[in-house]
Image (cartoon, rainbow, N blue to C red):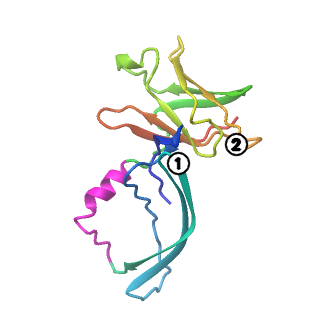
């Protein structure tokens, strides 16, 4: 599944990460050689959490879709803007960092980013507006994330650990949300401890 980057959202009275409104989860499908059918039926069981003032889990909901099969990909022009919007939200590899390191200090995680180019945006001088979204629950998304720039130009994020995350993680998988003009850029990272 190609997951778009999450957003900061409220889950009941807690700040967390998730999606609001419309979300598109894209799943590339490769058919076996010699597949001759005109359609493909996909079946799945899906689960999600729906929150407002209270939360309501939905588990193992049956889902099916029949897709046309053809020799060439023919996108429906009316769906093109939707796919383009969500494709732009899929995190990319971390090309703008020379080094990314992570270490645990008590109930905090220090995530250090060494950018290839030093940011020119004056708003980045002391507290870059970067956010980290955890992929495995190590970071408590309800706690404030501190972001500082060291005298050497390193970006140091201090993240609160979650009480429900993995006990002995070997890496910190997640997504960085980085301001980049009109829309943020999303970078997938997984630095080892």
Mark 1 is surrounded, within 10 Å at the Cα level, by few (under 14), some (14 to 19) or many (20 or more) other residues, namely few
Q: Residue at x 45, y 22 (%)?
A: 128
Q: Position of residue 174 (x, y in %)?
A: 56, 42
Magenta stretch: includes residue 161: no
Residue 82 shown in magenta: yes
The residue lying furthest to the front in this view is 53
Q: Most extreme residue toward the left, as rendered?
A: 77
Residue 54: which numbered mark, if any? 1
Whole-angstrom CA distance, mark 2 to mark 1, is 20 Å
Q: Residue at x 60, y 43 (%)?
A: 173
Give the quadrant of residue 40. Answer: bottom left
Residue drawn at (67%, 33%), measured in percent from left and top?
A: 161
Q: Secondary structure at mark 1?
A: loop
Query: Residue at 53% across / 58% down in the picture?
Result: 48
Q: Is residue 24 above or below residue 189?
A: below
The C terminus - image quarter: top right
Image height of 123 relative to 25, above or below: above
Q: Quadrant of residue 158?
A: top right
Segment colored magenta: 72-88
Task: Identify the residue under disc 2.
Answer: 164
Residue 148 position within the rendered picture, expressed as x and y whole percent measured from the top left = 52, 18
Label drawn at residue 137: none
Q: Extreme top residue here?
A: 151
Estimate the x, y position of residue 72 in percent, counting from the top left: 32, 75
Position of residue 54 in the picture relative to residue 163 (left or right): left
Question: Where's residue 142, x and y in %?
Answer: 57, 34
Residue furthest right in the image: 168
- Secondary structure beneath dot 2 equals loop
């Amino acid at each position: 599944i190609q997951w778009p980057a999450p957003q900061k959202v409220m889950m009941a009275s807690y700040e967390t990460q998730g999606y609001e409104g419309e979300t598109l989860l894209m799943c590339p499908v490769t058919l076996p050689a010699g597949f001759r059918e005109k359609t493909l039926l996909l079946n799945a069981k899906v689960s999600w959490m729906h929150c407002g003032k209270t939360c309501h889990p939905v588990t193992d909901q049956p889902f099916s879709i029949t897709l046309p099969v053809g020799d060439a990909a023919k996108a429906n022009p009316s769906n093109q803007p939707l796919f383009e919007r969500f494709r732009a939200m899929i995190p990319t590899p971390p090309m703008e960092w020379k080094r990314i390191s992570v270490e645990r200090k008590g109930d905090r995680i220090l995530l250090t980013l060494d950018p290839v180019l030093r940011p020119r945006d004056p708003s980045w001088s002391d507290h870059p507006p970067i956010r980290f979204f955890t992929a495995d629950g190590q970071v408590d998304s309800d706690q404030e994330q501190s972001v500082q720039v060291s005298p050497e130009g390193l970006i140091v994020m201090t993240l609160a650990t979650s009480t429900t995350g993995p006990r002995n993680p070997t890496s910190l998988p997640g997504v960085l949300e980085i301001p980049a003009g009109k829309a943020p850029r999303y970078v997938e990272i997984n630095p080892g401890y």
